[in-house]
Image: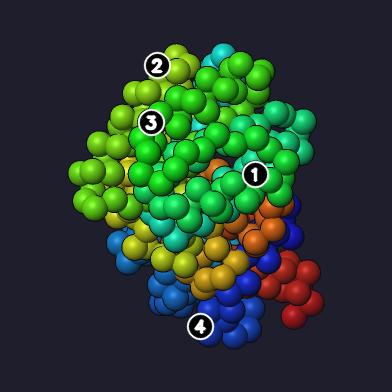
Amino acid sequence: MFGFIKKSLKKTTEAIKTIVPKKKPYISKEELEDILLEADVEYELVEIIVREIYQEKVTRDILRSKLLATLSYASYSPPTYTPPFVELIVGVNGAGKTTTIAKLAYRYKQEGKKVLLGAADTFRAAAIEQLTLWAHKLDIPIVSSKQGHDPSAVAYDAIASAKARGMDNVIIDTAGRLHTQTNLANELKKIVRICDKAHSGSPHRTLLVLDGTQGNSAIAQAKAFNEMIGIDGIIITKLDGTAKGGSVFSIAYALELPILYVGTGEKPQDLTPFDKYEFVDGILDAIFQEQEEIEKE
C-alpha cells in the first residue's frame, strides 16, 4: 500500500524538491513555510504549523508530529446496520465520481461481497451510460432509468432490488450539478429521505468525492455538500496527477472529516485506503535524509 501512496505523491514531492533540491537532516522555518505553500497547504494552516514549532532547526520528527496532528481531528467508525450497506456518493461533475464508484464496487467484490449500483445521477445521460458500462465490465448489477427521471425513485428501486436479491452493498451515484445549488440541495435531501424509507437508517454512509488537482479550492465544495446533507468521509481522486498533495492536510483540518480513500490511477484497483502515517512519511522522505545518511556525514 505504501508504494501506491508514495507513487501518488510523486508530483508533490517533485514540487517540494524545487525548494529543497537536496535532502537535509533539518530545515529552517522559512524553508518549511515555502515547502508547505509549494505543496498547496492552505496559508492559514501553514501559519499555524510554523507558529507552533519553537525550534529554529526543524527535524523530521518535529514536522512529522505536526503534520500528523492536522490529520487527527476526524476518524471514521462504521455504523451499526442491517444489510444491505447503502452508500450515497456525492461530488461535482468532473471529480471522478463515477469511476470512484466503480473502484469501490470492485473493492467490495474482491472482498467477496455482492454489490449493486444505483444510477441516480439522472441529470446527465452520460453519467448513466458511464456507470452502466462499468457495471457490465465488472459484472455487477445496476438499477438505472432514463435521463430526467426522478433520482429518488432510482435510489428507492436500487435499495429494494438489493434487499430482494440479498445484496451486501448498494452504491448510489448522485448528480453533481443542477441549475442552482438550491436544486441540488433539495434533490440530495430528498434522496436521503427516500433511502431511509426504502431501508431504515440508510444511507449508512455518505461519501464526498473531491478532485485532488483542485487543491484547496475543493474545501468550499466540501463545506457546501456537508451543509446540504452531512458527509461521513472523503475520497480524494487524481492525487497522482497533481503537485497539490499538501491540500489533503488543509481539507482534513478545515472540515474535520476523515479521508477514507485516495485515487492513485485509472484502473478499478487504483483506490487505496488512506493511511495518514504513510502519507506524511511519503512527503517527509522528499525533504529529510535518512538517519543512516546523517550518521555517515
Discs 4/2, front: 2
Q: Please tell me whether mark 1 sits on a helix, a strand or a loop.
A: helix
Q: Is residue 22 left or right of residue 119?
A: right
Q: Residue flagged by tag 3: what amino acid is it?
A: Ser
Discs 3/4, front: 3
Percent coordinates x, y for residue 140 in the rendering: 68, 38
N-terminal-most mark, 3 or 2: 3
Q: Is residue 32 left or right of residue 107?
A: left
Residue at image location 69% in from the left, 58% down from the top: 267
Q: Residue 141: which quarter of the image?
A: top right
Q: Residue flagged by tag 1: what amino acid is it?
A: Ala
CA–CA distance in space, label 4 to label 2: 54 Å
CA–CA distance in space, label 1 to label 4: 45 Å
Percent coordinates x, y for residue 87 in the rendering: 51, 32
Residue at image location 44% in from the left, 75% down from the top: 38
Q: Nearer the viewer, residue 187 or 58?
A: 187
Q: Residue 197: which quarter of the image?
A: top left
Q: Nearer the viewer, residue 116 or 7?
A: 116
* Above or below, 226 relative to 93: above
Residue at image location 72% in from the left, 29% down from the top: 113
N-terminal-most mark, 3 or 4: 4
Residue 135, label in figure: 1
**Does residue 64 appear in the picture of this structure?**
no
Percent coordinates x, y for residue 26 in the rendering: 57, 72
Residue at image location 20% in from the left, 44% down from the top: 182
N-terminal-most mark, 1 or 4: 4
Discs 3/2, front: 3
Q: Please tell me whether mark 2 sits on a helix, a strand or a loop.
A: helix
Which residue, given by chain and number where applicable, does mark 3 sit on?
A: 152
